Image (cartoon, rainbow, N blue to C red):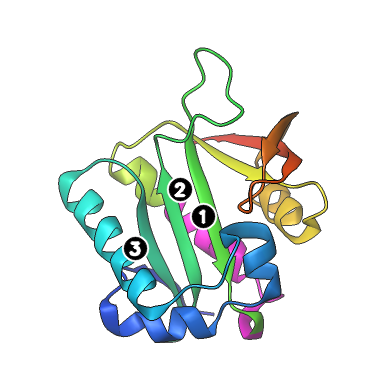
Amino acid sequence: MAIELRPLRHEDAAAQCAGEDEQTVRWLTGGYGTLAGTRAHFDRLAANAEAGRGKRGFGVWWDDRLAGYVDCDPDNRDGLQPGEAPVNLSYCVHPWARGHGVAVAAVGLICSYITDNAIGETAAIRVEPANTASVRVAERCGFRHCRRYPARDPAGNPISYDLYLHDL
């Protein structure tokens, strides 16, 4: 399996939108993306990467096919205690690519990117406990469960997240 991260381009927006499903909306986005909104998001990620700050994201490519998305955000403070400064990871895998280790590979690659670019020394995955697939990804990637904390889902509803941390 050849998994790699690549910067997202406008021409990737249609494939990214087509890869969204109920699970992506439920666990990550809170709503389906539009082509215009997805392209604007890709532009923000590229500008942040060029400036060396803020959320940076990539397409997850499996054998030259867009299989998902991963980002890192050093500014997300949700659920952290004073003195903690991990870089938050978010990801999604398109339905056709789930169950093949794509998310585990993508998390490993984004952790290497964080280290190689001196973005942070610790990575965080925040996940709803019911999202068992993401819990397994965190565990398989060596993240340790730290705590559960109250939060809001992408639609603004109260929920709880589990915080997983991994020293890089």
Q: Is residue 78 left or right of residue 119?
A: right
Alpha-carbon neighbours of circle 1 within 10 Å: few (<14), some, or many (≥20)? some
Residue type, label 1 = Gly
Is 107 within the magenta? Answer: yes
Q: Does the magenta stretch mainly form a helix, a strand or a loop? A: helix
Check residue 10 in the rendering and tell me which mark sits there, or answer none: none
Mark 1 or 3, closer to the camera: 3
Is 29 within the magenta? Answer: no
Residue 118 vs residue 83, the one in the foreground? 83
| Quarter where residue 61 is shown | bottom left
Report if residue 3 is visible in the image: yes
* Measured Cα–Cα span from mark 2 to mark 3: 21 Å
| Quarter where residue 60 is shown | bottom left
Mark 2 or 3, closer to the camera: 3
Q: In the rendering, at what x and y percent does residue 62 appear?
A: 48, 80
Q: In the rendering, at what x and y percent does residue 63 appear?
A: 46, 86
* Measured Cα–Cα span from mark 2 to mark 1: 5 Å
Residue 139 vs residue 34, the one in the foreground? 34
Provide the residue designation for mark 3.
41
Q: Earlier in the sequence, mark 2 or mark 3?
A: 3
Q: Which residues are magenta?
A: 96-111
Provide the residue designation for mark 2.
111
- Going 80% across and 46% down the picture, which residue do you hit? 129
Provide the residue designation for mark 1.
108
